[in-house]
């Protein structure tokens, strides 16, 4: 008997410790960034929370396109003809300003005015609590430490058993402890991937995906019967693929990848 505890009893204690450490990690993840302030989010804001700057710019330029302002030119260029829609978001106005002369989409994304608008957008989302500050992200990472501490105790028992030549329990207990240690480390490693969005933002995105489930690309909505607001919301929540169904040539010019089925952050909002 190693450490004065039998193998089965230690395994039960280990599982209880893992459960407690996991509860701490998940509680920290659920509480950090759960409060927000400011005005309701626009489609551009939602797009940034879903898939960062690229999707936000695609939603912004899609708003201009649906307003009849953006036109396709030669050599894969875009240009504007007319003012932006009234009440447009700052990023949409910056995209409009960048397209006052014909530009490729890559040049638009590199425009200093667009970069400034994106920085202001990020600053506002951080200030209002939708995006996490560096300090909040550190707290999320630290919340996983109890899991690694419990795993370290289990590994130490296995090492002591091998070094001292003393049994840590029957074969079933040893194998069970080894597998539990491995699962604990993998779970801690998975939780160490800290999201940029706060708990409130992830909760909002999940709610929007349920509310607007009929707009999901896999449902193949009839966009001829839908308005601009529905299209922009679908892009902001589910990624840019709806634009391919509405305006495929324009979608390809603004970098929509038909092979990409979902935004890179899509699955992470469930954590």
Image (cartoon, grey):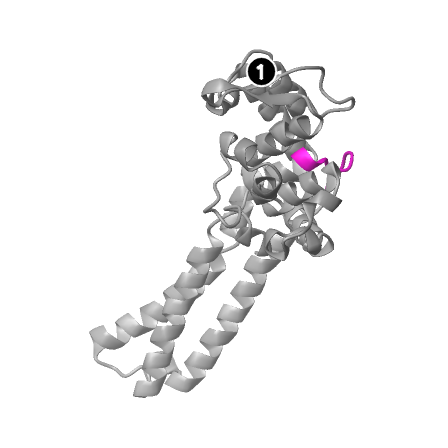
Q: Is residue 42 magenta?
A: yes
> Could you say which is closer to the camera, residue 229 or residue 188?
229
Q: Is residue 177 left or right of residue 256?
A: left
Residue at the image point whose x is 58% and y is 24% from the top: 119
Q: Where does the image place residue 25, in percent across and percent down from the top left?
A: 55, 58
Closer to us: 72 or 101? 72
What residue sits 68% from the left and 41% below the top?
231
Q: Where is residue 158 shown, x and y percent of the image?
A: 30, 73
Density class for disc 1 (Cα within 10 Å; few <14, some 14-19, many ≥20) is: many
* Residue 194 visible (yes or no): yes
According to the picture, the residue beneath numbered tag 1 turns out to be 98
SS for dot 1: helix
Read off the magenta span: 36-44
For the N terminus, give its image quadrant.
bottom left
| Residue 225, quarter of the rendered image | top right
* Residue 86 image offset from top left, x and y in percent: 78, 21
Which corner quadrant holds the C terminus? bottom right
Q: Main secondary structure of the magenta part?
A: loop
Residue 131 visible in the displayed image: no
């Amino acid at each position: 008997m190693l450490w004065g505890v039998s193998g089965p009893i230690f395994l039960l204690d280990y599982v209880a410790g893992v459960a407690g450490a996991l509860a701490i990690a998940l509680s920290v993840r659920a509480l950090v960034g759960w409060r927000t302030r400011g005005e309701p989010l626009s489609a551009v804001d939602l797009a940034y929370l879903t898939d960062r700057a690229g999707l936000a710019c695609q939603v912004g330029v899609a708003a201009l396109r649906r307003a009849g302002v953006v036109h396709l030119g030669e050599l894969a260029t875009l240009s504007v003809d007319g003012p932006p829609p009234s009440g447009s978001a700052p990023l949409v106005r910056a995209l409009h300003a960048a397209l006052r002369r014909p530009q490729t989409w890559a040049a638009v994304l590199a425009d200093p005015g667009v970069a400034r608008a994106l920085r202001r957008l990020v600053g506002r989302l951080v200030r209002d609590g939708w995006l996490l500050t560096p300090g909040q992200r550190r707290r999320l990472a630290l919340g996983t430490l109890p899991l690694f501490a419990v795993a370290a105790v289990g590994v130490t028992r296995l090492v002591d058993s091998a070094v001292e030549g003393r049994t840590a329990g029957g074969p079933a207990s040893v194998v069970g402890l080894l597998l539990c240690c491995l699962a604990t480390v993998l779970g801690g490693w998975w939780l160490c991937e800290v999201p940029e969005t706060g708990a409130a933002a992830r909760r909002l995105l999940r709610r929007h995906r349920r509310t607007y489930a009929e707009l999901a690309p896999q449902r193949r909505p009839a966009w001829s019967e839908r308005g601009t607001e529905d299209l922009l919301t679908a892009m902001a929540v589910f990624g840019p693929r709806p634009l391919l169904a509405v305006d495929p040539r324009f979608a390809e010019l603004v970098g929509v990848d038909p092979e990409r089925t979902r935004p890179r952050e899509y699955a992470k909002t469930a954590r």
